[in-house]
């Protein structure tokens, strides 16, 4: 969408900018909360440990960190009863396949019970707040109303089938519900859990380079050069300098990926010149040990300026922090202060997890601002959501190239398009999961996941919860599994990553 707009010089209406910000913003908030509670928290929280908790002490603990209303002894006793029934039935349902009782768990029983209770609350909360995206985008998580040139979401204060005063009121309600839960449940829980795992502030850091394309446009004239969350590249963890982003520095090679280039597999290509021709050379059934000295991945080696580079909430918050973003800096410093650690702790598994929470809070705070911007436009009679003045192909050049940046919840996403004779000649996507799960490149540089696991302490290789902690901290969006092998290549266990 932004790639085609960039190629054809299309400027979107201001309402379309705001609508895109709102859809992305509520998705950040919902997605990050789901990630913390339902995809990552149980790497740190022992569900069965909650059975040993005293509900009265759990209530006292909860009330010391927040004034969230669901914090009575009766409430926590009821949650404990639900968990007990599941455990005794032998059918753990949503809590199945965990490493319960693992020696790496460190939370006291009361903290475990509090976190499990909020896990269950988050399931219900997220179903409600995401209705904002449904109102504007028609579907979650893949909105249907984005169009080249703007949006397909109608605005008409006199129609019940369009955005009107009732829609604005409903969205403000969803935004308040989102912000309340983030402020009074998510952030307090994050700080409470992190306080017992401070050693993870020096584990899982991985590569030293961080990229953000920038997101939440402030105007309609730029691609993503003027955004509420700024664009930038941090090299070698140097927070004193943020380099501007140049899309021409993004490359992909397939030296270790199951693709082939028409010329040289070890020569990196810019996505405008990219190729995605499958070339599987991996093991055949019965799938013997994977030889990682050869091609071993379905992900290309994505690099920025030749460097393995992390993307995601941590990268966005580091770039914002180093760029002097006032609110991000305030919240980052608050979180670091409460944990008693310095900025270097951000370069870690714990820092990555904390950064997602920080981003959730500052984004939730912005939702009412964007809603009120939309309301102000409607009030002054601006109802335009789409710009179609470039839709006549006869006005297009013989060849056009474009790129479109977007910061998805999981990280930097960019599409590159080449249009020739009014047809798409080449289209390449470089997605967040690709950046972070990239394999080694032709120079032998490890990918982000690979580098982050170097030096990870593992108490029990048959139950590698420590590996899951770091990998889950990236929120990997892949249909994949982790295979644990010993030094001789013998498989010990298969672990579902997600």
Image (tube, rainbow, N blue to C red):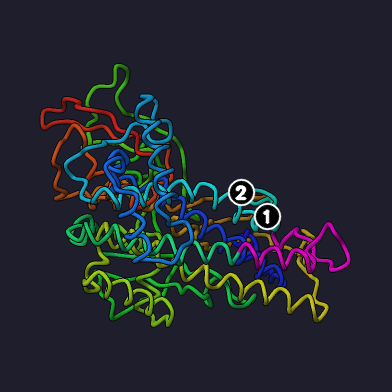
Q: Position of residue 164 (x, y in %)?
A: 80, 66
Q: Is residue 144 left or right of residue 336?
A: right
**Viewer-closest of 245 and 62:** 62
Q: Residue furthest top?
A: 286
Report the label total.
2
Label 2: state its secondary structure. Answer: loop
**Residues under labels 1 and 2: Cα distance?**
7 Å
Query: Any magenta on residue 181?
Result: no
Q: Residues within 10 Å of mark 1 (few under 14, many from 20)?
A: many
Q: Please tell me whether mark 1 sits on a helix, a strand or a loop.
A: helix
Q: Quadrant of residue 50?
A: top left
Q: Which corner quadrant holds the C terminus?
A: top left
The residue at the point 46 percent across, 55 percent down is 33
Classify the position of the N terminus by image quarter: bottom right
374, 248: nearer the viewer: 374
Percent x, y of residue 367: 58, 70
Q: Is residue 441 visible?
A: no
Above or below, 476 relative to 223 = above
Residue 11 position, x and y percent, is: 69, 71
| Residue 137 numbered mark, or none | 1
- Between 404 and 99, the one lying in front of the other is 99
Q: Are marks 1 and 2 in contact (CB under 8 Å)?
A: yes
In this rendering, does residue 122 appear at all? yes
Q: Which residues are magenta?
A: 148-174
In this rendering, the answer to whether 339 lies above or below 458 is below
Residue 62 in which image quadrant = bottom left
Q: Is residue 129 left or right of residue 291?
A: right
For label 2, the residue is 140
Residue 164 part of the magenta segment: yes
Q: Residue furthest left?
A: 487
Q: Residue at x 35, y 62 (%)?
A: 304
278 relative to 309, above or below: above
């Amino acid at each position: 969408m932004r790639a085609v707009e960039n190629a054809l010089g299309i400027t979107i209406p201001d309402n379309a900018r705001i609508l895109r910000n709102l859809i992305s913003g509520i998705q950040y908030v919902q997605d990050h909360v789901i990630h913390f509670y339902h995809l990552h928290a149980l790497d740190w929280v022992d569900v069965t440990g909650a059975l040993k908790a005293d509900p009265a002490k759990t209530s006292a603990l909860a009330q010391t960190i927040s004034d969230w209303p669901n914090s009575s002894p009766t409430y926590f006793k009821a949650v404990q009863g639900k968990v007990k029934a599941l455990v005794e039935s032998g059918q753990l349902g949503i809590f199945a396949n965990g490493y319960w009782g693992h020696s790496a768990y460190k939370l006291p029983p009361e903290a475990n019970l509090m976190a499990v209770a909020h896990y269950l609350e988050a399931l219900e909360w997220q179903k409600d707040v995401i209705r904002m995206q449904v109102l504007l985008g028609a579907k979650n998580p893949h909105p249907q109303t984005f169009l080249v040139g703007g949006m397909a979401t109608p605005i008409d204060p006199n129609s019940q089938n369009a955005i009107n005063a009732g829609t604005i009121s409903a969205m403000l309600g969803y935004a308040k519900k989102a912000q309340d839960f983030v402020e009074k449940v998510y952030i307090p829980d994050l700080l409470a859990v992190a306080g017992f795992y401070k050693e993870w502030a020096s584990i899982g850091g991985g590569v030293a380079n961080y990229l953000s394309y920038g997101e939440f446009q402030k105007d309609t004239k730029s691609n993503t050069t003027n955004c509420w969350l700024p664009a930038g590249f941090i090299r070698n963890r140097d927070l004193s300098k943020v380099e501007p982003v140049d899309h021409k520095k993004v490359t992909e090679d397939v030296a270790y990926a199951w693709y082939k280039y028409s010329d040289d597999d070890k020569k990196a290509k810019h996505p405008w010149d990219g190729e995605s021709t499958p070339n599987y050379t991996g093991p055949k059934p019965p799938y013997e040990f994977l030889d990682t000295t050869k091609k071993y991945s379905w992900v290309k080696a994505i690099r920025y300026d030749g460097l393995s580079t992390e993307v995601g909430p941590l990268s966005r918050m580091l770039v914002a922090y180093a760029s002097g973003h006032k609110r991000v800096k305030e919240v980052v410093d608050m979180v670091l202060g409460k944990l008693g650690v310095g900025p270097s702790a951000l370069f870690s598994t714990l820092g990555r997890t904390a950064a997602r929470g920080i981003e959730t809070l500052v984004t939730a705070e912005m939702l009412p601002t964007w809603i009120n911007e939309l309301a102000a436009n409607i009030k002054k009679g601006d109802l335009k959501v789409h710009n179609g003045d470039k839709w006549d192909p006869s006005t297009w050049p013989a060849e056009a190239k474009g790129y479109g940046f977007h910061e998805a919840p999981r990280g930097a996403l960019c599409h590159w398009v080449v249009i020739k004779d009014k047809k798409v000649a080449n289209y390449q996507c470089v997605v967040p999961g690709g950046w972070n799960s990239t394999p080694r490149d032709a120079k032998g540089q490890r990918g982000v996941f690979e580098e982050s696991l170097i030096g990870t302490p593992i108490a029990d290789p048959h139950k590698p919860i420590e590996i899951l902690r770091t990998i889950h901290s990236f929120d990997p969006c892949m249909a994949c599994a982790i295979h644990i092998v010993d030094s001789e290549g013998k498989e010990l266990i298969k672990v579902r990553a997600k």
